[in-house]
Amino acid sequence: MRKTRRRQAGNITVAEPVREKILRPKIAGPKIVGPSDKINIPTDLLRTFVAIYQLGSFTKAAHLFELTQPAVSAHMKKLESLIGADLIERNIVGVNLTACGE
């Protein structure tokens, strides 16, 4: 049954629907807080990141995507600037993920 209320419009009584406030449940979940909140990350940057980690080398990732090594480095620099943290540590033997990179 719809609820209505009556109001006086001049000499005529008018019945109009009552708008009820709809209560929606608040969905609580884990929220990422920080510079990476609400940003779109291009998939090519993520693919480059994963390839560097899996292959253990910027150069091997560059060969995989048929890019130059400086282009792969630029991808990582852009991704790290979007995230706001270092993701990969370079060393002589290869690469390691930082805590944020994991």
Image (spheres, helix red, strand yellow):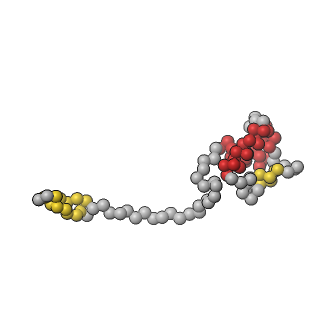
Q: Where residue 89 sits in the image (x, y, percent)? A: 80, 52
- The residue lying furthest to the right in this view is 92
Q: Nearer the viewer, residue 44 or 90?
A: 90
Q: Nearer the viewer, residue 4 or 8?
A: 8
Q: Report whether residue 47 is seen.
A: no
- The residue lying furthest to the front in this view is 10
Q: Quadrant of residue 85?
A: bottom right
Where 6 sits versus 63, above or below?
Answer: below
Horizontal arrangement in the rendering, residue 3 relative to residue 76 (left or right): left
Horizontal arrangement in the rendering, residue 7 relative to residue 95 (left or right): left
The C terminus - image quarter: bottom right
Residue lying at 75% horizontally and 35% vertically, measured from the top left? 67
Where 54 sits versus 62, above or below?
Answer: below
Q: Report whether residue 34 is seen.
A: yes
Residue lying at 76% horizontally and 56% vertically, measured from the top left? 98
Q: Where residue 99 sits in the image (x, y, percent)? A: 74, 59
Q: Quadrant of residue 57?
A: top right
Q: Where residue 30 sits in the image (x, y, percent)? A: 59, 63
The N terminus - image quarter: bottom left
Q: Where residue 29 sits in the image (x, y, percent)? A: 56, 63
- Report the number of numbered marks: 0
Horizontal arrangement in the rendering, residue 97 relative to residue 34 (left or right): right
Residue lying at 85% horizontally and 51% vertically, measured from the top left? 91
